[in-house]
Amino acid sequence: MTRLMIVASMVALAVISGCNSKSAHNSARYNFDGGRYLIEVETDGPTDTVVNSQFADHGKGKELVEINWGESMELRIEEGKLTVNGKDRGTLAKGDRIKINSAGKVLVNSTER
């Protein structure tokens, strides 16, 4: 009986201490226009996200991708030009993988920009 109480106490302690630990990062992944851009946005917790995209149809219109999340984070791709929070992050090519971690670090194809 004493053994059962010790084991139960240890399990309860593990559960309680796990509840107080910092939550893991959340990730949202987006695939635009059949793989033209693969985007991953990482946050410290749940957040609202707004996504807008349009792509040229047979040369009409222009390419635009916008993702807004958190209180002030913004990614924008316009005609291949990447900006994050208004800062120019260079030109993208079809198939590029873009990742923004929870600290705001921008990686394109695993290279920081």
Image (cartoon, rainbow, N blue to C red):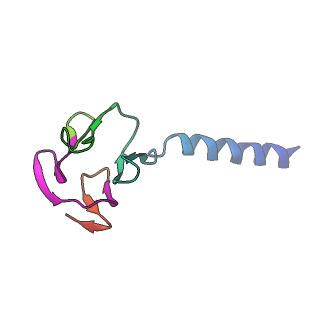
Can the viewer see residue 1 in this picture?
yes
Residue 1 falls left or right of residue 33: right
Residue 56 falls left or right of residue 86: right
**How far across and how far down the image is residue 103, in percent?**
27, 52
The answer to if 86 sits in the magenta stretch is: yes
Please report the bounds of the magenta region as a residue range.
74-100
Question: Eyeballing the image, is 91 above or below 17?
Answer: below
Most common secondary structure along the magenta stretch: strand
In this rendered view, identify the residue nearer to me: 44 or 29: 29
Quadrant for the C terminus in the image: bottom left
Question: Eyeballing the image, is 44 above or below 38?
Answer: above
Q: Residue at x 84, y 49 (%)?
A: 3
**How far across and how far down the image is residue 96, in percent?**
31, 61
Can the viewer see residue 69 in this picture?
no
Residue 48 falls left or right of residue 10: left
Q: Residue at x 40, y 35 (%)?
A: 46
The answer to if 76 sits in the magenta stretch is: yes
Residue 25 falls left or right of residue 64: right
In this rendered view, identify the residue nearer to me: 113 or 10: 113
Q: Residue at x 25, y 61 (%)?
A: 93
